[in-house]
Image: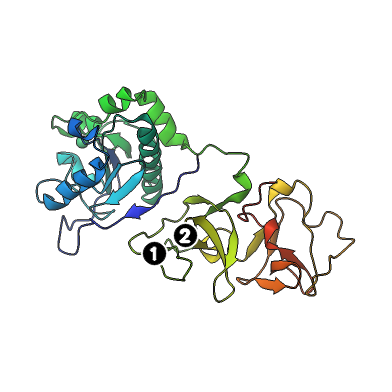
Amino acid sequence: MIFMLQINKNYALGDGEGDMRIAQNLYVVLHESGNQNDVYDNQAVVHEVQYMRNHYNSAYSTFFVGGGGQVFQIGEPGYVAWACLGGNPYSPVQIELARTADAGIFKKDYAAYIELARTYAQKYGIPLTLDAGGAGTAGIKSHQWITNNYGGDHVDPYAYLASHGITKQQLAYDLMHGLTVVDPITICNVVQAYSPNGGALTMYHANGQAFDNTPLISQTKWVSNGIVPDKFGRPMFLVGKDSYLPQRSTTLNQIVEINQKYGKCATAVTANGKVISGLGNKFKAQSRWKTADKLFNIKDVGWCYQVSNIEFIPIKYQVGSGFKG
Ligand SMILES: [Zn+2]
């Protein structure tokens, strides 16, 4: 599975709400809601998030995951949240998980939970270890570990994870290695969001409008099913229904990487659409070529990247074209 991380900020705390203190970057804390009423409620995560939003003065976390891998933001990442008492000042991110009895929903929730923890641990320079060491040892921590080291009585999330067959050892392994299983059919078409300065990235609708409330986190990976130009001719990866990720917002900014599904070589054409012969294996699979953030519509060939004064590569050869071989 290739995880697609989108964060719903419709219920996020606003200015002047929640703790204003910047947390020390020691822990990412893992929770689960502990609410058994959630297990047969398809909207459990939304209900949990609404409740938390309305009662943030008593307790809140940074994120809530549930409903089949949905991620909701409540507290601002990097700031103190109120979900683990004495551990709060050291935890820039705390993640809740809504319960479900549905194994399919759990699988997606768990993937989101893991990926979110890994993404933010890396963002804040926190090791991917689980419950390692004592108080002051940075890493990803269960609420149980926080309780053991800072007091309190919560011992989540292990019992709930165990109910879906996830042991502590499995959780530790998944946090360390991630859950991305490379699918040989789609590997050629995975693109990775990338922001050189770590700033927010966004996706666009087909009409050119930016998405609301779903800033992309740098380094998230997306399966692309096609490449289309926006109205300025800039290449956009089609990564979901009416969801376009600009190529300039990925690690392929101004780069053509020959889709390895071809196994051999891409063909280049001239500006007039004539196939260039005698190139040998120049444009071989996985080779990378400098290009501009612009596509050219070449007669009888279609949209192409320009990679030299005379050479154009049809978009189907680019990683993310959706070509499956
Ligand atoms: Zn907890």
The structure residue drawn at horizontal position 39% and vertical position 33%, both measured from the top left corner, is 104
- Label 1, ligand 1: CB separation under 8 Å: no
> Which image quarter has ligand 1?
top left
Q: Residue at x 76, y 69 (%)?
A: 300
Q: Position of residue 267 (x, y in %)?
A: 79, 59
Residue 96 drawn at (x, y percent):
26, 40
Q: How many marks?
A: 2
Camera-side residue: 321 or 33? 321
Would you say the residues marked 2 and 1 are in contact, meaning their CB atoms lie under 8 Å apart?
Answer: yes
Question: In front: 41, or 254?
Answer: 41
Q: Indicate which disc, 2 or 1, sits on the residue closer to the N terminus.
A: 1
Badge 1 density bin: few <14, some 14–19, many ≥20, Cα 10 Å: some
- The quadrant in which residue 292 appears is bottom right
Instruction: Please name the amino acid that badge 1 sits on.
Output: Phe
- Residue under pointer 1: 211
The spot of residue 297 in percent (x, y) is 69, 73
Q: Which residue is mark 2?
A: 243
Name the residue rendered at 51%, 55% in the picture: 239
Amino acid under label 2?
Answer: Ser
Q: Is residue 271 above or below residue 164?
A: below
* Residue at the limit of the structure toward the right, as seen here: 278
- Judged from the image, the secondary structure of the residue bearing numbered disc 1 is loop
Give the CA distance from mark 2 to mark 1: 8 Å
Q: Quadrant of residue 141?
A: top left
- Horizontal side of 294 relative to 210 (left or right) equals right
Does 254 appear above or below 49?
below
Seen in the image, is 293 located left or right of residue 79? right
Few, some or many C-alpha atoms within 10 Å of disc 2 (few <14, some 14-19, many ≥20)?
Answer: some
Residue 8 is situated, as x and y percent measured from the top left of the image, at 31, 54
Q: Is residue 175 above or below residue 203?
A: above
